[in-house]
Image (cartoon, rainbow, N blue to C red):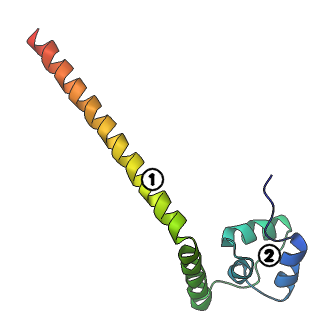
Amino acid sequence: MTKRKFTDEQLQKKYNKGLTDIEIAHIFYVAKNAVTTRRWKLHLPPNHTVTTKTITNYNQHLKQIATKHKPQIQQWTKQHKKQEQEQLLIHYQINRYTTQTLKNTAND
């Protein structure tokens, strides 16, 4: 079981101050969905509607996360590309084998 990055009580305090899910997510350095899911489990309606300001703040938050975890993101991207290339090679080999088999069958 993973350890929570914030408690229900911490969420409730921020919620009671009128903060939005995005603002709370920024404070606890978690995804907005983590806050939203927990808030719904506590039967709390959203505090505010989404505004351009909150979207801008959330985008800045995502950029901070991306900057902080840049090496991990680059490593994941590199591994993902390598796996994709390996899969393409396998598909190419299967297609070559299938084409060759069909040609041999047609010649028989």
Vertical placement of 84 versus 2: above or below?
above
- Tag 1, which secondary structure? helix
Residue 79, numbered label: 1
Looking at the image, is mark 2 or mark 1 nearer the viewer?
1
Furthest-right residue in view? 9
Q: What residue is shown with label 2? A: 45
Q: Amino acid at mark 2?
A: Pro
In front: 63, or 18? 63
Q: Is residue 104 left or right of residue 13?
A: left
The residue sitting at 37% across, 41% down in the picture is 87
Furthest-bottom residue in view? 53
Q: Is residue 22 left or right of residue 66?
A: right
Task: Quadrant for residue 61, please give it.
Answer: bottom right
Percent position (x, y) of residue 21? 72, 78
Percent position (x, y) of residue 9? 90, 75
The residue sitting at 76% across, 86% down in the picture is 19
Vertical placement of 49 versus 105: above or below?
below
Q: Residues within 10 Å of mark 2 (few under 14, many from 20)?
A: few
Q: Is residue 31 left or right of residue 14?
A: left
Furthest-top residue in view? 108
